[in-house]
Image (cartoon, grey):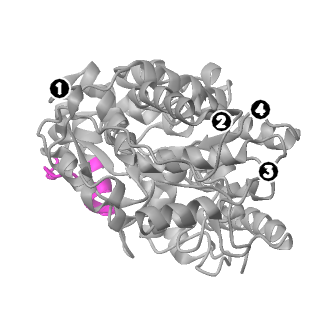
Amino acid sequence: MVDRYGSSTRREFIKRFGATGAVAALGPSLLLAACAEEEATTTTAAATTTTGPAAAPSTSFVEPRTSLSGELKILLWSHFVPAHDVWFDVFAKEWGDQVGVAVTVDHIGVGDVPAAIAGELQSGSPEHDLLQYIAVQGQHEPSVVDMKDVVDEAISRYGTMLELTRKSSFNPNTGKFYAYAPAWVPDPGDYRKSLWTPAGFPNGPSTWDELLDGGAKIFSEQGVQMGIGMSQEIDSNMAGRSLLWSFGGSIQDENEKVVLNSDATIAAVEYMKELYENAMTPEVFAWNAASNNQGLIAGELSYILNSISAWRTSQETDTAIANDTFFTPALAGPATAIAAQHVLYNWLVPDFSSVNVDAAQEFLLHYTENLASVAWHSKLYDFPAFASRVPELNSWLDNDPFGAQPADKLSVLKTATDWATNIGHPGPANPAIGQVFGESILPVMYADVAQGNKPPAQAVEDATAQIEAIFGDWRGRGLVGG
């Protein structure tokens, strides 16, 4: 086996992706924000297509249900596909001009968004009328407006809402939509075909066993590691849940009872340790949400569990890497084959008298009306929660308008709703699930075992105790069942 810990490849990897102590000392939020910002600069900042700008969907307008005025201040993340933000800022302001509302849009690094949202909601005087984050925000339910009116109106106009996004924005215990979630992003596996073909998997891995077998062989024979994180960031959280579910475990059951401590969870933790020891290096314990993207783009990783953003970036920076990158659906484990959504859009309206609630909600309906433009200008990163709004999606995935080679590379995503689920699976993404996610309890559980800090059963027991306490707190407030 190659020297996994002393090679020049590893030293180069650490230098490039910031797993040194000095960089790690910045903390997860600053690391994530800085690297996400770096990633954004590598992608073209304008939406272009092989068929010209005229191919982009046109914007449609529906008259608001009530007269609007005043200001609408929006806070949201800096999208991993910067072309989206170029479009969104113009789109939002043009809507404001149409309806008589002065719209301002503030984008900040994704790592800074959770603290910004919490700060505004706790301040008693939020600076923005509309807040957006790319993960579940159920823990803020007591401080935000019920979005049921928006959901009901959207359903009446556009049909059924995707169950994944509904469960990621609705609390069945209170009957409240603490957020509005009109869009989401699939989380396929991204693999390098030239590396997996000689390992015996020309179509990439289809199971977690194949991921281990092929990944270990690639690492041993070709010196290229795998990129599944065990760090306190969003991608590690998503990967850990996919592995857990596929092995038959879960944090809660469908009735919101904590069931993490099980043989299935222990088996998943043991698997992750074996995967780490045979196919990865210590960098995965200090990663942020951009690290696996950057590693794939640089040709340093054989497989990551992520959205299509890294590949989109490589289309601009290294066409050889882009053309060699392909995608797989959720990997099959002993129990099933499902994955969490990569991200989803939880739009929150603060419940304070100073907030322009009417304008915020009407803008979200306008946004939903134009989900085809959302998908297009994100270069097919964003998927709709209302399928009828993007009837062209499957044809775009079969014949990518942004230059995929081959053109049907993204066709695997046509079945994404069959293998994607919400982070609370098999229950809802309730406030306790949101807090567990925010505190990265699962990635820490996996890391403790992989690093040899705890035996599997102890790590699972400790994580369960933490989660039980969180569920008990929210249950005491009447916001979680079970």
Q: Quadrant of the N terminus?
A: top left
Q: Which residue is mark 3?
A: 351
- Residue 113: mark in rendering: 2
Between marks 2 and 1, how big is the CA–CA gap? 34 Å
Between marks 2 and 4, how big is the CA–CA gap? 13 Å
* Circle 1: element type: helix
Amino acid on which disc 2 is placed: Val
451 left or right, relative to 138: left
Q: Which residue is mark 1?
A: 320
Residue 476: x percent and y percent?
A: 86, 72
Task: Choose mark 2 or mark 3, whichever is in front.
Answer: 3
Q: Which residue is mark 4?
A: 127
Residue stretch in magenta: 199-215
Q: Check whether the beta carbons of the residues at disc 4 and disc 1 lie within 8 A of each other.
A: no
In the depicted structure, whether residue 28 falls above or below residue 387: above
Between marks 2 and 3, how big is the CA–CA gap? 18 Å
Point out the residue furthest to the right here. Answer: 124
* Circle 3: element type: loop
* Earlier-in-chain disc, 2 versus 1: 2
Amino acid on which disc 1 is placed: Ala
What's the residue at 41%, 24% (across, down)?
Answer: 13
Between marks 3 and 1, how big is the CA–CA gap? 49 Å
Between marks 4 and 1, how big is the CA–CA gap? 45 Å
Q: Check whether the beta carbons of the residues at disc 3 and disc 4 lie within 8 A of each other.
A: no
Residue 22: x percent and y percent?
A: 64, 19
